[in-house]
């Protein structure tokens, strides 16, 4: 019998540097460990780390980041390529590790990614997998707890411990199943892709592209939005404040669209008095700066894929082809969702098939399916010419 299924999770609370060093050195002697984090992100730009959960197969260590001063043993564990780090739905956890320790865990295995290759629905939750494999119902009532509050209750700590206590035996069960399929290397590729995406820096120069309705603006207004969005992101990073708590998206867009000249005009545009009082002058200065830019410096008008007359029929044709080429042992959406199909269309129609910026569909294990889908778009182009 699996010991984790026979026993409730037990744990050690790690609050000092020496205890952390001991726990991490023990973990480095294992072939795989389970990792998780608890954090809060409400008004801040960066996540606020409240707890790290580490299970090495013998001991669950709940690491309190508020009392530890030397994290070098934990960073060394994250970097140790001899130890597999098992996580579930880990994209946000990776951001936490990157932000706090400037080190991503390598190598990683995400059990949510594994699940997709074992015929589970997309984005299957940890509780569902534990129920499936172990017939256990885990308590999720502490999900919305304040992980920065101290002291953490026994209930909160047991909840946190459970996430890694069951994760390691779950990984072993799933790994044994995966070994019976042809998808092991595909899982490795997709897990590596998560790390790769986390390493891509958020470019302040292109922050304007993430403002809703930016596509509605003509190039001169986009120049204003570009300067405003770049400033807002840099301000958010500097003050560790969520973007919308610096200036809301709709306010930024309204300023870019209307090019106000005076503080009173900002109020007329519907900006919050708080936004005007703290950032009004700066925004007006940026509007003035944009007016001084030469026309050749303006960003190009944003071309929306959905406005292309070929879009609807091409998307339908791609979805049909995807169903036709998807193997019987893999759901089509694991190969490509709608967003991936759109990325392929953008690469062909808007990026001139730039070989240096291949979409995910033309990389790794997906490439054989991606080429089939690319043929569909090439046929559409041929029929039009």
Image: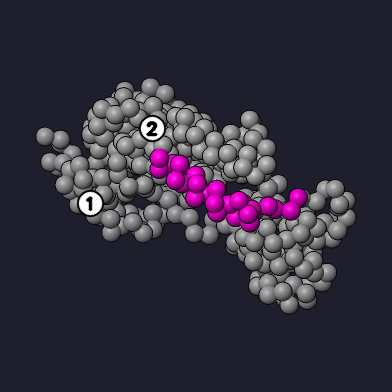
Rounded to the nearest angstrom, the CA distance separating label 2 from label 1 is: 26 Å
Residue at image location 74% in from the left, 63% down from the top: 256
Residue 75 is labelled as: none
Write down the quadrant of residue 232 in the picture: bottom right
Mark 2: few, some, or many residues within 10 Å (few <14, many ≥20)? many
Query: Closest to the observer: 10 or 112?
Result: 112
Query: Closest to the observer: 277 or 350?
Result: 350
Residue at image location 22% in from the left, 51% down from the top: 138
Query: Closest to the observer: 343 or 38?
Result: 343
**323 inside magenta stretch:** yes
Answer above or below: position of 204 versus 196: below
Q: Give the residue at mark 1.
A: 138
Write down the quadrant of residue 215 in the picture: bottom right
Q: Which residues are magenta?
A: 300-324
| The C terminus: image quadrant | top right
Q: Secondary structure at mark 1?
A: loop
Q: Secondary structure at mark 2?
A: helix
Could you tell me if residue 89 is visible in this image?
yes
């Amino acid at each position: 019998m699996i010991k984790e299924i026979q026993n409730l999770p037990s744990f050690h609370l790690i609050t000092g540097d020496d205890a952390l060093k001991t726990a991490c050195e023990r973990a480095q002697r294992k072939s795989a460990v389970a990792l998780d984090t608890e954090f809060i992100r409400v008004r801040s730009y960066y996540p606020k780390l409240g707890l790290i959960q580490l299970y090495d197969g013998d001991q669950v260590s709940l690491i309190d980041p508020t009392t530890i001063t030397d994290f070098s043993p934990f960073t060394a564990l994250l970097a140790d390529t001899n130890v597999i780090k098992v996580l579930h739905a880990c994209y946000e956890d990776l951001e936490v590790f990157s932000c706090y320790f400037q080190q991503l865990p390598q190598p990683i295995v995400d059990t949510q990614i594994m699940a997709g290759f074992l015929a589970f629905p997309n984005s299957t939750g940890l509780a569902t997998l534990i129920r499936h494999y172990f017939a256990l119902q885990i308590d999720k009532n502490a999900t919305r707890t304040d992980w920065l509050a101290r002291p953490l209750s026994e209930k909160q700590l047991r909840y946190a411990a459970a996430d890694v206590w069951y994760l390691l035996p779950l990984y072993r069960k799933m790994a044994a199943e995966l070994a019976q399929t042809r998808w092991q290397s595909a899982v490795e590729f997709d897990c590596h892709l998560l790390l790769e995406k986390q390493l891509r820096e958020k470019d302040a120069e292109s922050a304007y592209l993430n403002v809703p309705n930016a596509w509605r603006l003509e190039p001169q207004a986009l120049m204003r939005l570009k300067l405003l969005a770049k400033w807002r992101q840099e301000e958010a990073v500097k003050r560790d404040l969520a973007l919308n708590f610096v200036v809301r998206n709709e306010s930024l867009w309204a300023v870019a669209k209307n090019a106000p000249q005076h503080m009173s005009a900002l109020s007329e545009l519907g900006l919050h008095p708080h936004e005007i009082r703290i950032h009004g002058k700066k925004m007006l200065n940026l509007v003035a700066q944009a007016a001084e830019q030469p026309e050749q410096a303006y960003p190009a008008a944003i071309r929306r894929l959905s406005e292309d007359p070929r879009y609807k029929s091409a998307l339908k044709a791609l979805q049909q082809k995807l169903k036709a080429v998807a193997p019987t042992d893999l759901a089509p959406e694991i190969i490509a969702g709608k967003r991936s199909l759109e990325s392929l269309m953008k690469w062909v129609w808007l990026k001139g098939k730039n070989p240096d910026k291949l979409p995910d569909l033309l990389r790794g294990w997906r490439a054989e399916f991606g080429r089939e889908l690319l043929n569909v778009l090439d046929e559409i182009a041929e029929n039009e010419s």
